[in-house]
Image: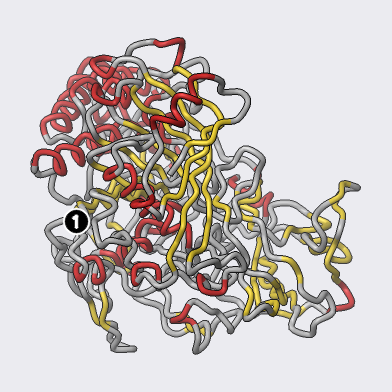
């Protein structure tokens, strides 16, 4: 490995090039190019870790096609740049590390960025993600962590995204073609829709080039809901588009429909694509960078321990990373010592397929029937009672003796929108499953998929729901999880026990047994996402999907958390807002009628349903939930109970002691706003 500097770096990087020259022994990281290296906030010190620096650049990898740990990478041997039995790929990276690595704590958080966008520093510490002007409270830096964000997604869109640069694949020099599928429910009328995955108003992943616009396999359908029958739109009414709103776009990157795409309907397209990339190299890049950081003393970001961290798409990436056996490097050593996979639900994804589509997930009204919430779901082996397939998420890691410490954390939303329950029950939905010793499952009750500020507001555009979003924060849970993971790996200190709903105690129930108070004016969901049995054709086990859309078998059972008389869920890790409530916080929200399909759930969101102020007010409206005045005699009484609930969370290590004051201040704010 060698460091290659650009003109902006000067003498310092010339010296660094010499210092970081590496022998060919670490061949899977071929070299690192540093494009910028700067001290954070002018050399400000962060506790015992001292000053930090931020380094950006590109890591180059060489993957040996004959190494058994690379055999799982789909189409690696078909890469167009295969040379001497090796394939080169590269990844953009950002590293934030102590200037003097000896002052750090020796632990790296290797962030798997969401659709190319890093976000951990902003989420956990506040301030700027790039640390240009503000480091927030600098908790991660004060604790001495090194934070690296590494591009892994070959189709990440956007100029500033961290990209994974993978070669295309050809079959003995011949162009490879295959069927690719996408779908979308617009929230407003659109003349054209993109082939790439449009998620919350932006492209989460670009799409493959259309091989032949006139191929008879190119199909566009429409239906009102996931379960409804597809209706084919005549080919004469739509065409692949080259321009949108007068702006040049990549050839055939959009679909134009005569009369436009209407809100509240699911449009699904299948087309013949060409030139797949070797997307599965992203798994190996995460693997090899972790090993490089730990085993190469001249690493650009040295570490003794590496924890893989991912949220949503990237939590699914980490689940699939483990399932597909990528935690053993080319020499069989453990890559990630710990895994923090957040709000992944039961999901994995299309990360290592021919014509992979990493951005496609599984939402209530889009990204439907993709290889996401699919068997196996549990960490320990389980048997599908219908197919009789037996497997567990960690089978290969166990075989390779590289099982990391794992936190699977989720919110209330994932039980409705990501089939989370099936990760800790038997496939027939009748019994609680047994977890392995290296796994903890945490459910953060009342939270939605992503956090929003308080006071809460309704979502916008595609996220416009009938109710305001649930505003409970995940930030403080993240800080405690990181501290607990580090203590577990570093010192063997056991983390808090798993906390999630169970069949045995009645806190997890089939959807038909779910009870929720009848709140005036509130519409309730009629369904929830399920684990799926899908068939993409005979070559699917090899990562080649030939059936689009897939054949769909019987879904796995749907179970959701049971609620109390207020509608708040009774299980999991509960913030004071749940144990000492002023409102109901759900894991679901329905689409606003203005964006169509008002019976369907809106993606990612929960609902915030405040209590009435007084008994008379609630009786006038017919609200069965006790009012605030019936629950608490005064602000002082409420805050005493709130503070006691915070103390309990600190004692149980769900919250760090230093975050106690911030949560108590939030409790004061919530009382003042909700009792006005």
> In the picture, which quadrant includes the C terminus?
top left
Q: Is residue 113 left or right of residue 632?
A: right
Which residue corresponds to the image point at 21% horizontal and 34% vertical from the top-left? Answer: 483
571 or 297, nearer to the observer: 297
> In the picture, which quadrant includes the N terminus?
top left
405 or 554, nearer to the observer: 405
Q: Is residue 111 left or right of residue 388?
A: right
- Residue 291 in sight here: yes
164 or 570, nearer to the observer: 164
Quarter location, residue 234:
bottom right
Circle count: 1
Query: Residue 277 location, x and y as percent?
Result: 60, 65
Query: Residue 671 location, x and y as percent?
Result: 34, 21
| Label 1 neighbour load within 10 Å: few <14, some 14-19, many 20+ | some
- Label 1: which residue? 439
User: What's the colour scheme?
Assistant: secondary structure
The local secondary structure at tag 1 comes to strand
Image position of 28 with respect to 168: above or below: above
Image position of 85 with respect to 384: above or below: above
Which residue corresponds to the image point at 22% horizontal and 48% vertical from the top-left? Answer: 572
Quarter location, residue 430:
bottom left
Which residue corresponds to the image point at 23% horizontal and 74% vertical from the top-left? Answer: 426
24 or 611, nearer to the observer: 24
Query: Residue 200 location, x and y as percent?
Result: 61, 47
Image position of 377 with respect to 202: above or below: below
Quarter location, residue 106:
top left
- Residue 517 in sight here: no
Image position of 294 with respect to 47: above or below: below
Q: Is residue 170 left or right of residue 123?
A: right
């Amino acid at each position: 490995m060698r460091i290659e500097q650009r003109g902006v770096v000067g003498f310092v990087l010339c010296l660094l090039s010499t210092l970081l020259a590496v022998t060919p022994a670490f061949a899977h990281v071929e070299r690192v190019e540093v494009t910028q290296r700067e001290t954070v906030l002018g050399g400000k010190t962060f506790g015992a870790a001292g000053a930090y620096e931020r380094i950006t650049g590109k890591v180059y990898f060489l993957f040996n096609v004959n190494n058994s740990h690379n055999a799982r990478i789909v189409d690696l041997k078909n890469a167009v740049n295969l040379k001497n039995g090796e394939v080169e790929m590269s990844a953009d990276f950002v590293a934030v590390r102590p200037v003097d690595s000896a002052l750090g704590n020796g632990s790296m958080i290797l962030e798997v960025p969401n659709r190319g966008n890093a976000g951990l520093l902003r989420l956990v510490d506040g301030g700027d993600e790039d640390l240009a002007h503000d480091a927030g409270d600098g908790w991660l830096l004060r604790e001495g962590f090194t934070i690296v964000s590494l591009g892994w997604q070959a189709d990440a869109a956007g100029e500033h995204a961290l990209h994974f640069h993978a070669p295309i694949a050809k079959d003995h020099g011949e162009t490879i073609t295959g069927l690719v599928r996408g779908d979308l429910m617009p929230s407003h009328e659109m003349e054209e829709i993109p082939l790439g995955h449009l998620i919350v108003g932006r492209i989460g992943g670009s799409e493959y080039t259309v091989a032949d616009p006139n191929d008879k396999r190119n199909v566009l359908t429409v239906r009102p809901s996931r379960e409804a029958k597809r209706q084919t739109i005549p080919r004469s009414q739509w065409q692949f588009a080259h321009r949108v709103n007068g702006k040049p776009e990549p050839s055939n990157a959009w679909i134009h429909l005569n009369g436009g795409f209407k809100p509240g309907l699911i449009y699904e397209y299948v087309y013949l694509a060409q030139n797949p990339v070797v997307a599965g190299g992203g798994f190996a890049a995460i693997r090899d960078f972790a090993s490089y950081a730990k085993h190469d003393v001249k690493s650009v970001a040295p570490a003794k321990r590496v924890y893989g961290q991912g949220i949503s798409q990237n939590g699914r990436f980490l689940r699939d990373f483990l399932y597909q056996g990528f935690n053993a490097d080319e020499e069989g050593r453990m890559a990630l010592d710990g895994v923090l996979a957040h709000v992944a639900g039961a999901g994995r994804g299309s990360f290592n397929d021919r014509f992979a589509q990493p951005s496609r997930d599984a939402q209530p009204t889009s990204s439907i029937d993709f290889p996401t919430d699919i068997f196996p779901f549990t960490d320990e082996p389980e048997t599908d009672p219908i197919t009789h397939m037996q497997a567990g998420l960690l089978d290969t890691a166990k075989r390779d003796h590289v099982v990391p410490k794992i936190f699977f954390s989720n919110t209330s939303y994932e039980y409705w929108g990501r089939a989370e329950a099936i990760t800790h029950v038997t496939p027939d939905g009748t019994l609680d499953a047994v977890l392995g010793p290296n796994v903890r499952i945490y459910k953060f009750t009342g939270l939605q998929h992503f956090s929003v500020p308080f006071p809460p507001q309704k979502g916008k555009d595609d996220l416009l729901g009938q109710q305001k979003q649930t505003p409970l924060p995940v930030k403080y849970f993240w800080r405690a999880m990181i501290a607990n993971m580090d203590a577990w790996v570093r010192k063997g200190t056991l983390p808090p026990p798993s906390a999630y709903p169970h069949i045995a105690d009645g806190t997890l129930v089939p959807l038909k047994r779910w009870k929720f108070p009848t709140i005036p004016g509130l519409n309730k969901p009629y369904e929830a996402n399920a684990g799926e049995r899908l068939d993409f054709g005979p070559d699917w086990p090899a990562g080649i999907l030939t059936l689009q859309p897939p054949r769909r078998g019987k879904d796995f059972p749907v179970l959701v958390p049971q609620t109390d008389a207020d509608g708040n869920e009774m299980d999991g890790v509960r913030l004071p807002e749940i144990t000492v409530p002023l409102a109901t916080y759900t894991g679901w929200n329905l689409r606003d009628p203005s964006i169509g399909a008002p019976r369907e759930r809106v993606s990612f969101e929960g609902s915030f349903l405040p209590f009435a102020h007084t008994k008379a007010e609630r009786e006038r409206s017919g609200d069965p939930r006790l009012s605030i005045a019936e629950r608490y005699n005064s602000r002082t009484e409420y805050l005493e109970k709130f503070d006691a609930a915070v103390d309990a969370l600190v004692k149980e290590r769900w919250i760090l002691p230093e975050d106690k004051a911030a949560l108590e201040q939030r409790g004061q704010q919530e009382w003042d706003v909700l009792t006005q």
